[in-house]
Amino acid sequence: MNKKSILSGILSMATLFSTGCEANEQSNSSSHGINGAVYRKIDSDTAYKMINEPDDKIVLDVRTEEEFAEEHIENAICIPDYELSSRIEQEIPDKSTKILVYCRSGARSYGAAMTLVNMGYNNIYDFGGIINWNYETIVGE
């Protein structure tokens, strides 16, 4: 590989990174584009507002069924992160569906968001963990 090819590759990656990871301070989010799909990292206040908007959306809890039964956000569905690849297309076939993803601390929700984007879902919002959720939850159901 010659120097010109290497420099071109570095410039392409820098351009992709700078355009694909734009911070949006007004909505407390950042966006990442992969293959035309978009993943946005948002905070729990933004997620709460979005959940309460009248449009269609799915709130997706990617923790285990046991964690979900202990406590979850109202109207959320549970698909554990380790089952996501095998179940998501049956449960949410429309890849343009707005999906708000959370877990316990934010690690699994990030991984799940990346899985969804890699599978072609293009309207993904990751709001991290339920431990940072300052609103009501359903306990013990």
Image: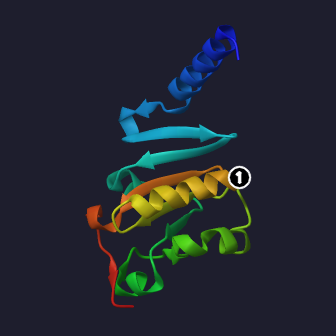
Q: Is 115 located above or below residue 2 in the figure?
A: below
Query: Whole-percent x and y of residue 39?
Result: 55, 46
Query: Whole-percent x and y of residue 31?
Result: 50, 39
- Residue at the outermost front position: 1
| Residue drawn at the location 62% of the way across and 57% of the way down | 116
Quadrant of the frame with the N terminus: top right
| Residue drawn at the location 63% of the way across and 51% of the way down | 117
| Residue drawn at the location 69% of the way across and 56% of the way down | 119
Query: Whole-percent x and y of residue 8?
Result: 65, 14
What amino acid is labelled 1 in the image? Answer: Gly
Quadrant of the frame with the C terminus: bottom left
Tell me: 80 left or right of 23.
Answer: right
Tell me if mark 1 has few (under 14), some (14-19) or many (20+) residues whose alpha carbon lies within 10 angstroms of its own.
some
- Residue at the outermost top position: 4
Q: Quadrant of residue 51?
A: bottom left
| Residue drawn at the location 44% of the way across and 74% of the way down | 63
Identify the residue position indicated by label 1 in the image: 120
Q: Can the viewer see residue 67 in this picture? A: yes
